[in-house]
Amino acid sequence: MVLDRESLEILARALDKLDAGFAHLPGSSHSVPGAERMEEVLLALAEKLQDNYPYFHPLYAGQMLKPPHPVARLAYSLAMYINPNNHALDGGRATSKLEVEAFSEIAAMFGWKEFLGHLCGGGTMANLEALWVGGQLHPGKKTVASDQAHYTHERISGVLQLPFEKVATDARGRMDLNALEKLLAGGNVGTVVATMGTTATGSVDPLPEILKLREKFAFRVHVDGAYGGYFVLASNLEEKTAEKFSRITEVDSIVIDPHKHGLQPYGCGCVLFRDPALGRLYKHDSPFTYFSSKELHLGEISMECSRPGAAAAALWATQKLLPLEHGGEFAGGLARGREAALQFFRAIESNGKFVAAFEPELDILVFVPKGDSIEQISAKSRRIFEAAAREGLHLAVAELPVKFWSSLKPESGRATVTCLRSVLMKPEHLEWVGRIVELLKNAAAG
């Protein structure tokens, strides 16, 4: 059985429990429009959904995609029978409390007890809020992020009409400190974005050194941990990488995406601010939303209005089942993904036909086939990508700087190379590294 069905029995029992809580209501007629054709439509949908890569399978190692934990899927489904809206307590009375509890556990993971935070639609929305706050506190000043940071920072800055500038990176895809200091010396930087796990290579910016520069230049430090934030719990990081994560507690704001390593369905991001007083920046009046409670509504400290309470229920349930603690089962899953990437790296290095850019800091590895020129290597990368897919192995291709490979030299008019990229973010990838290597060899030989 590829797709889980057994858990549906658990959902049925949970629905009985939920239904019992409303047994006191008087009976009401309830018709479902189109009920007689629901099965027909769902079966048609199931057929159309087959036109997907097998994101849930260990042989899918291309993009940052994996299924939510069964408990998250079930909790989301259960909450959807109520369909709460966490914008205001009137619309999400129970799930608003669950949201506060869930994001407080995420904050505690970074060592924060006093803070401001909430869930949101994803990393893009979370980063928008963090950069908006930075713009409010430092009007007219630049936001800067590395040239390997997610493109969303530049796009968001444009939306917010904030000046933005990219900072060069070193040969391992991390923010170059000398380049950053030159920018800071201009005196017009309000926010520095430190990426804790770039989406291209999983590289982690030098946060301790960035914090030291803050002492001199007085800017805000925002951590984009959308991809890598949860690795603060991983037990097998390189010592220097672990130190970077240990310093997150000192930054001004944090973004993390539970819908990546947090085992959640899409539509679940989280933004946290170290200073709870920043809630004043969100202050607004709404004569129709806040009328039944004097307590703080989550909509009063977020830019989004309607937000799914089901997302909060799913995250709460997942963290109750798998607590965010060092040495726990959740943390072990992160360590297994990183170990899979390390084993894959060693296999690539010993194979003789490929060259990895560098040892992965987290669970992402980028590599190229050997060749006589950048053009030939790029063409071979695309050919192997397609051949691997025919073998059942799904990788990704990326266009990255040649400088990431010490054995490659930029050629006239071409400073990037098309490479292969693998994201080994599923714990079960560790058991499949051998098979992945075998299929890659077959693809390269074909």
Image (cartoon, helix red, strand yellow):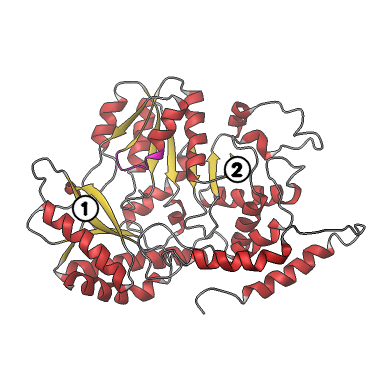
Instruction: Give the amino acid at mark 1.
Output: Thr
Report whether residue 368 is seen.
no
Report whether residue 441 is seen.
yes
Residue 328 belongs to the span the image colors magenta? no
Q: Position of residue 25 (x, y in %)?
A: 90, 57
Q: Is residue 172 above or below residue 422?
A: above
At a point 12% along the width and 56% down the height, the residue shown is 376
CB under 8 Å between discs 2 and 1: no
The quarter of the picture where residue 217 lies is top left
Question: Which quadrant does the C terminus fall into?
Answer: bottom left
In-image side of 363 versus 329 (left or right): left
The disc placed on residue 418 is: 1
In-image side of 137 versus 208 (left or right): right
Q: Which residues are magenta?
A: 147-152
- Mark sitting earlier along the chain (2/1): 2
Q: Position of residue 337 (x, y in %)?
A: 39, 65
Q: Is residue 336 above or below residue 192?
A: below
The residue identified by callout 2 is: 118
**What is the C-alpha distance between the residues marked 2 and 1?**
38 Å
Q: Position of residue 350 (x, y in %)?
A: 17, 70
In-image side of 317 versus 52 (left or right): right
The disc placed on residue 86 is: none
Q: Is residue 19 above or below residue 279?
A: below
Instruction: Give the amino acid at mark 2.
Output: His
Q: Nearer the viewer, residue 340 or 83?
A: 83
Q: Position of residue 363 (x, y in %)?
A: 35, 60
| Camera-nearest label, 2 or 1 | 1
Few, some or many residues within 10 Å of mark 1 (<14, 14–19, 20+):
many
